[in-house]
Image (cartoon, rainbow, N blue to C red):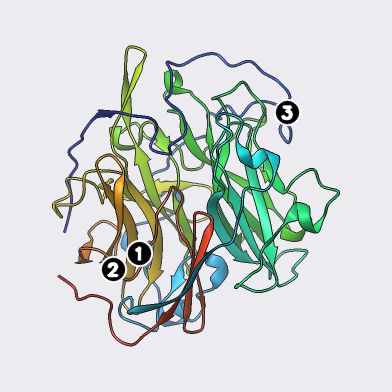
Amino acid sequence: MRVRVILVSFCAVFACGATLVSHPMAWARGSTGYQQVPAETSPKSRWYDLSQIGVRSVSDALLLTKRDLARLRDDAGILDLSDRSCLPPLQLLWDRKVLENSEEWEKGIETGKAVVGYPSIVRNVHGVTPDGQYYLFYAIHDAYSGIGVAISPTIDGTFRKLHEIQPWRPDSRVLRAPERPRDQSHFSSPVVLWNPRENRWFMYFHFYANEWDLGMGHQRTALAISDGLARHSWTPWTDRKKRLIGVLPTTRARWMNSQSTYHSIQRLPNGTWLAFLRGTGGQYNGSEWVQDPSKLGFAISRDGRRWAEVPDNPVIYQDDGRHGRRGVYRPQFVARLSDRFLVVWSESNYYDGDSRLMQATTRDFQSIEPVAAELPELKLNMADGAMSPWREGNTLYFFYGARQSAWRMLDGCSTQRK
């Protein structure tokens, strides 16, 4: 099914639930923690054409051989179900909270009521300091925030925050947002993956910088790099003027002209990187921000740095012909099945009520085939930030918000294709 876009405008806070954006303003510069200047976006923040990243077609870039499938790894972010033709029925083993708001920065400067979440789970088996432990990166969504980490020797937990393990540290952040006046800066929604081409860890994260007047929107996704997780040292990728390079920037197209955030990102074993995008568009009416409901699309890359949109974005949205819900759409995860890809997202009633998990299959991320109205097994309270999936044998783990759920895979298919 190929989809086309019809936009619906509404007045609301940003879909990320953080701040009503005022008209573009000048920022005061101050101390910036890990960076020397505020996180203005570099002019190098751009999208590339497929030919510019060395891709002839999306289908070619996504083609996986049997040898590739044998090399699917947990550190690639994509859920490996290549031994199955569908998502199987799932039996809940447990669902529990694994993160708490326990440090001062986690309370949030704006409201004092921020909630930890936005998880990304990886196992530290690469780089200069592999220790075999599980690293759960997390964030809040508030000014002056950053990216924290909690660590466990097993996937089941208990996850201990970095400050608890190393009390001499001021807190558990491994990446700090620049210090600015309120309402004007945050780092959030980390996605951490190993890059075998560079032999370094990549962390994608989104940041707020109101550069609407410059044609770059409000929130983009940037990149930080580390050569070893246990060193707890991450360097944002910036230009010579220390400006963040938005590797997944906003677009000129309305569907993502304001926010390019909360993406689900994974690496395929053939060297292709895949981003399941969440775009939010809108416009200013005088000093009032009028925001569209978020929509979903895809992008690919050969190196994790230069990205090209898949043609015909957005692919999944409110008026794509599926009679979907009218509220907020969120990417959750991508899985590799035996002969195609499984795409899972959530969508809610207008504006953001009663969120449900949906699924579809695809071969090219341009046309999708819905397989069910929703996923009844995964009755989870979805929030901003993609789910971070993990598989250990016959057990699936989903990290979402501040919680972890574990599910036993049963025989058969959870739903039949439409």
Q: Quadrant of residue 375?
A: bottom left
Q: How many numbered discs, if any? A: 3
In this orientation, which residue lies closer to the viewer: 304 or 147? 147
Question: Who's the residue at 20% across and 76% down the image?
Answer: 416
Quadrant that contains the N terminus: bottom left
Can you say whether 304 is above or below 237 in the image?
below
Q: Are marks 2 and 1 in contact (CB under 8 Å)?
A: yes
Please name the residue that numbered disc 3 is placed on: 36
Residue 5 seen by the camera: yes
Q: Tell me: 50 left or right of 97.
A: left
User: Residue furthest toward the right?
Assistant: 168
In this orientation, which residue lies closer to the viewer: 317 or 363? 317
Question: Who's the residue at 21% across and 49% down the image?
Answer: 325
In this orientation, which residue lies closer to the viewer: 303 or 360? 360
Can you say whether 412 is above or below 53 in the image?
below
Q: For the residue marked with disc 3, what is the amino acid?
A: Gln
Q: Which mark is residue 379?
A: 1
Q: Secondary structure at mark 1?
A: loop
User: Residue furthest toward the bottom?
Assistant: 411
Can you say whether 200 is above or below 87 in the image?
above
Can you say whether 14 is above or below 189 in the image?
above
Q: For the residue marked with disc 1, what is the amino acid?
A: Lys
Please name the residue that numbered disc 2 is placed on: 376
